[in-house]
Amino acid sequence: MTSYVNRFRLVLLTVSVLVACAVNAAPAAPPALSPMFYPIQGVATIIEPGGQFYTNLGDKAQLYRGAMLRVVRDGQEIARAKVLKVDRLDSIAQLLPPYQGLLLEAGDTVQVVQNPVPATPRHRLPSNEPTLTRDDDLLVILLTLFAVGTAFH
């Protein structure tokens, strides 16, 4: 009987420590990005009139609004552009004034020359709220019940 009580105490202590660590864990900080050069490369996919074009680079590739792009064809730089809008998987860029009349082709290589680090909006400061969701809470409860059940079995 004493060994079961000791096992139960050990299981409860372990689960308590794990839950405390999960609840008190600070949210992960976004990766630090170099504002000068970030080695991201993609292609121009859709060319719009007026010097705008779509790229296959987006938020998933950690591209940010305001990034400066270099457009390359056959190994030669043919234009520079600035990112206007970023979606999850693509972005819209605008050719800079010296290159406005240039007609890009779908498939031209796009290289990120400068990718500014986004600033945290003032109204949305990082919080120290627990990172557990309701599903995580249920998982912890189920694991605790499983651990208690196996300790007495």
Image (cartoon, helix red, strand yellow):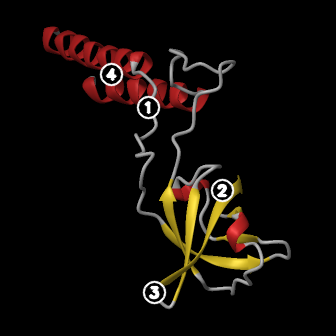
Q: Residue furthest left?
A: 3
Quadrant of residue 56 in the image? bottom right
Whole-percent x and y of residue 133? 57, 27
Whole-percent x and y of residue 127? 55, 17
Three-letter amino acid code at the position of disc 3 = Gly
Callout 3: few (<14), some (14-19), or many (20+) C-alpha neighbours within 10 Å? few
Q: In the picture shown, does residue 114 fall above or below 12?
A: below
Three-letter amino acid code at the position of disc 2 = Arg
CA gap between label 3 and label 1 equals 36 Å
From the image, tell me which residue sits under label 3.
75
Of mark 3 and mark 4, the one earlier in the sequence is 4
Classify mark 2: helix, strand or loop. Answer: loop
Q: Quadrant of the N terminus?
A: top left
Three-letter amino acid code at the position of disc 1 = Ala
State yes or no: discs 4 and 2 in contact (Cβ < 8 Å).
Answer: no
From the image, tell me which residue sits under label 2.
88
Q: In the picture shown, does residue 33 fall above or below 147?
A: below
| Whether residue 67 is visible | yes
Q: In the picture shown, does residue 54 fall above or below 12?
A: below
Rendered image: mark on residue 18 = 4
